Amino acid sequence: MTPRRPAGADAFPKTAVEPSGTRNSEEGALYAALDLGTNSCRMLIARPKGSQFQVIDSFSKPVQLGQGLEASGRLSRSSMARTVHALQVCRRKLEQHRVPNMRLVATEACRRARNSRDLLRTIRRETGLQIETISAEEEARLAVISCAPLVSHKTETLMVVDIGGGSTELVWIDLEDVEPKERPRAIMRLSDGFGNPQPGGARVVDWISVPLGVATLRDQFADVEDDGGRFALMSWYFEEMLAGFTPYADGAPDEGFQIIGTSGTVTTVAASFLGLRRYDRTKVDGLEMTSTQIDRVIHSYLQLGPDGRRADPRIGRERHALIMSGAAILQTLMRIWPTSKLSVADRGLREGLLYAQMVRDGVLAADGLNGVA
């Protein structure tokens, strides 16, 4: 199964909804997107439907591929075995649905590990799947285009934040010269690259991939026993890594500024803010939160302590060990660029991969990207 590469075009879906189970396949070409990250292996199988796509099947498993990577620079045998096992499940789903179009990618852990080629060869031998390791810039581009439907027509300056397991991508975009109703489409067109702005189009002022995500930042300070002290150290260390990011010294613009955050950290904070004991994507995706509201949620996590967070249903069993490192990243960003409009995105790399493939093939209606008024 050879993955096909995406390309830009002029259409883009407005929304995509991921179900909890498997739907029966109907007629129409199917597409798959697989994201092998530092912490999780996740896949979506979907069909284009008008200007959107309908998810047919999904898979998500915390494989902890990057466990121990900070200390050794290598992927461990146990993490590689967990990953191969998860990918065997993905292969069966792809075969079950007879998916002809797919893109299967790996990110930060495979970019950094000295033995990542060994893992990819093992995956190919054991599962038949061909995984490609993408660059940090392409990862950032895919996260940006997946968030395009959440861009407000009033937004003149946009920052997209993608907090991953092994890295965090920040993209700062100037939309001031773009017609308001065209701003979401202008974001989508960045799929072709950050370095070639078009007249009247979106301009990427700067972007950065910080080699710290929820798993790698946690591992940096795993030996610090004090919960509050560890959180403070993680915040300080992450901020130190932003010194080379051009907008760091400028702070947030006074008007027309929007941050879109995409990650399990951001959606978990949103679910906690809403008091959801059971996660509901329809309530979380597109939710807007202020810096103050985010601070209150994070403060409540600190008050709970490790045991309280482990038992909190809003956080979940798979997220509790990573939530404070993610919260340290998020709170640092909100302190540097305070805003009354952080838009929560329950979407990211997989959606970006699907969008790009479908746009390339011209199978989406052209009128689906309306953005937020």
Image (tube, grey):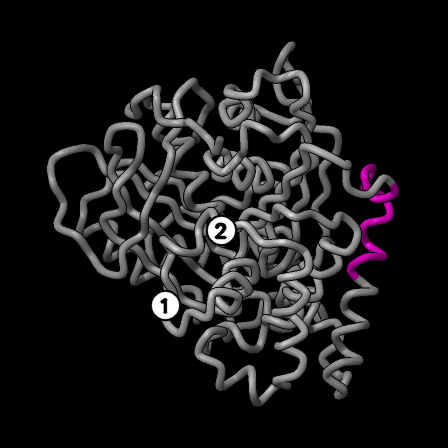
Label 1: how many Cα within 10 Å (few below 14, some 14–19, many 20+): some
Residue 131 inside the magenta-drawn segment: no
Assign the N terminus to one quadrant of the image. top left
Residue 365 lies, in percent from the top left, at 30, 22
Viewer-nearest residue: 35 or 373 = 373
Provide the residue designation for mark 1.
Answer: 85
Q: Quadrant of residue 354?
A: top left
Provide the residue designation for mark 2.
Answer: 287
> Which residue type carries mark 2?
Leu
Residue drawn at x 54%, y 41% as measured from the top left: 143
Residue 141 lies, in percent from the top left, at 57, 35
Label 2: how many Cα within 10 Å (few below 14, some 14–19, many 20+): some
Viewer-nearest residue: 180 or 95 = 180
User: Relative to 238, is 177 above or below?
Assistant: above
Residue 76 lies, in percent from the top left, at 57, 71
Residue drawn at x 38%, y 56% as measured from the top left: 281
Helix, strand or loop for disc 2: loop
Q: Magenta residues?
A: 238-249
> Which residue type carries mark 1?
His
User: Relative to 43, is 151 above or below?
Assistant: above
**Disc 1 or disc 2, which is closer to the eye?**
2
Looking at the image, how many numbered discs can be counted on the residues? 2
Residue 179 lies, in percent from the top left, at 57, 16
